[in-house]
Image: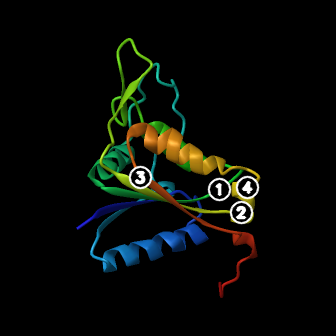
Amino acid sequence: MKKILIIQGHPDRESYNTALAEAYKKGAIAAGAEVQEIVIRDLEFSLNLKHGYRKRTELEPDLLVAWKQIKWAEHLVWIYPVWWGSVPAIMKGFIDRLFLPGFAFKKREGSVWWDKLLTGKSARLISTLDQPAWYYWLINRRPSYYAMKKLTLNFVGISPVKATTIAPIRLSTDAF
């Protein structure tokens, strides 16, 4: 049985992303997976990494629970809108606060290299856009996809990372 963690990064509980997360959850359970969820908007934590990496900011209880869920999972599913070519601020703050040295990676003494501490996990990125997906790929070169895949998830050892993009959302109707 696969252990799947769905991480929902949209701040609006009435969003299309919320519906996507619920549909994914139902499908995964029906397929026999064990599923847990993190709805970032429901967590209580400071978005700001106040001291950068110079000094550790204590993790709030909700972040400690979220970290246990990330460690538990074999497959992480991130569901979020792309805003200004990136992820919502609440999701970025969640990543900044949790994907820390000593947690997600370990800096090597006297070296520019690091050890990846989240190996053995895979991920799926499900993002929504207002622009056509082909335009986001061809003209803008998918900055949020590469930031999430290469600069965040692969950096800490999560691989493979696959992506699904649903767009353009702003032209959708209840029927589609």
Of marks 3 and 4, which one's residue comes earlier in the chain? Answer: 4
Q: Amino acid at mark 1?
A: Val
- Mark 1: few/some/many CA within 10 Å (<14, 14-19, 20+): many
Residue 160 numbered tag: 3
* Dot 3 and dot 1 residues touching (CB under 8 Å): no
Furthest residue in direction bottom, as rendered: 175
Mark 1 lies on a secondary structure that is loop
Residue 134 numbered tag: 2
In the picture, residue 63 is in which quadrant? top left
Of marks 2 and 1, which one's residue comes earlier in the chain? Answer: 1
* Dot 2 and dot 3 residues touching (CB under 8 Å): no
**What residue is drawn where x is 52% and y is 72%?**
20
**Rendered view: 100 above or below 12:** above
* Dot 4 and dot 2 residues touching (CB under 8 Å): yes
Of marks 3 and 1, which one's residue comes earlier in the chain? Answer: 1
Question: Which residue carries the number 4 mark?
Answer: 138
Question: Which residue carries the number 1 mark?
Answer: 82
In the picture, residue 58 is in which quadrant? top left
Of marks 1 and 4, which one's residue comes earlier in the chain? Answer: 1
* Dot 2 and dot 1 residues touching (CB under 8 Å): no
Q: Amino acid at mark 2?
A: Trp
Q: CA distance from mark 3 to mark 4?
A: 23 Å
Q: CA distance from mark 4 to mark 2?
A: 6 Å
Residues 40 and 20: in front is 20
Residue 7 numbered tag: none
